[in-house]
Amino acid sequence: MTSTSRASETKSFAALRHPGFRAFWTGAILATTADSVEHVVSYWMIYQKFHSPALGGFAIFSHWVPFLFFSVWSGALADRYDPRRLMQIGLCMFMCASLGWGILFLTGTMQPWHAMVLLSIHGMAGVINSPSQQMLVHDIVGRTQLQSAVRLISTSRTLGQLGGPAVGGALMVAFGPEYAILGNALFYLPQILWLSKAPYGPKFRKAEAHAAPARAAREQSFRDIFATLREIASNRTILSMICLAGGTSLFIGNAYQSQMPEFAHDLGHGDPGWHYSMLIAAQAAGALVAAFLLESRGSVLVRPRTAIVLAMLWCFFIGGFAMSDSYPLSIVLLFAAGLVNLTFGSMSQSLVQLEAPPRLRGRVIGLYNMFGQGLRAFSGVTVGAGGALIGVHWSLALSAMVLLATMMVLLAFAQRPMAEPATPGE
């Protein structure tokens, strides 16, 4: 275990005490809200226009598959270029997607291929933005406040996911979907403008920290995946956290969210309304409570073992929800699942960033995103396709059991001591 396993934060909400991070975090909340608003409006209009389940499936596919194929490439770009500029490119792509939807809605000219192009642009914007955002967070707050910053960025995503549907619905009611999504593009502007002058990035790093990434950027191909894996092969912490992110995404991810109407129906609350909304919001509420509790403590011990054990608890909560026939119990289990999910997710991401070699930080983050977000494209198979065969309750429960067994193996791997390097002459 290295010294990076322990946070040196001593104050509550440590990262928010940094003025640069406060501005960055505010922009991130607005951008994440805009992302959610676009999903709400565009998915509704696609359904109204085409009534196509296939196009709805493509929306999920185009959102996650770019992370699978391009995360390491995007991380390599973040190693080589200024992450502020890459973030601006990603945010401008998000804006263009919103403007494209609005123009097509206003003119009434949208065709299925238009929707596929815009959905693909949105997916690529996410994969370009993500590693650069994480790199810039490290530049803003440094190592000592990184865990706090990662938790708060995760919280900003949760806030956006909670507030986005409400904001999107209100905008559609007030202005109609066409003008709602056009206005949504403005939510990205504050962070784009702040990034143009923000005093962070390669030019503001120490000279020795800046020189190393420049040398590391010479390799530029998909071979970077294998090259990066070779570089981190001796770091059990990074490998175990990447496997944790990949396993949780592959076997469960967030695929059960799309199956929530069936769970609600089986719990006796299949009609849209307060009870259904509570099921949707319970996990996000748990994540918000976790973030508040962790931040208010100020100092949190972070170890791979802790993250893996919490992921195992998540398996129990998700499996319990899958088999529950009680609505109150289901709410409690989803709340608990959200609480531990944010905790082990922020821990794993913090450990990866803290342990990553500075010259390869962007690529290691990209590799983490490839497993942690890209493999979500296949969780629909384990939960959704499995549900078509044996029912969503059993498919989710069995997925949780398989993931639990995987985490047990991973726990043994993470706790096994590393072999000592041989000394000359032995």
Image (tube, rainbow, N blue to C red):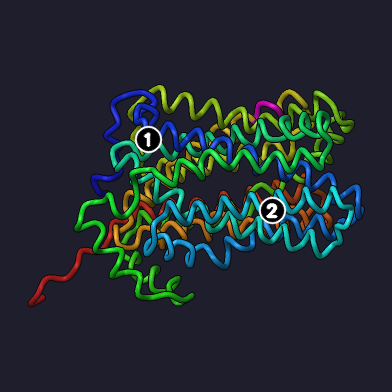
- Residue 184 in view (yes/no): yes
Q: Which mark is residue 20?
A: 1
Mark 1 and mark 2: Cα distance apart in space: 28 Å
Disc 2 target residue:
97
Q: Position of residue 387 (x, y in %)?
A: 80, 53
Q: What are the residue bounds of the magenta stretch?
A: 330-334
Residue that appears at 52% across and 37% down: 27
Comparing 178 with 371, the one in front is: 178
Pick the quarter of the image with the C terminus.
bottom left
Amino acid residing under circle 2: Ala
Q: Secondary structure at mark 2?
A: helix
Q: Please tell me whether the stretch drawn in magenta is mainly helix, strand or loop.
A: helix
Quick check: 28 left or right of 376? left
Q: Secondary structure at mark 1?
A: helix
Q: Which mark is residue 140?
A: none
Amino acid residing under circle 1: Gly
Q: Position of residue 364 (x, y in %)?
A: 40, 60
- Residue 245 in view (yes/no): no
Residue that appears at 26% across and 58% down: 210
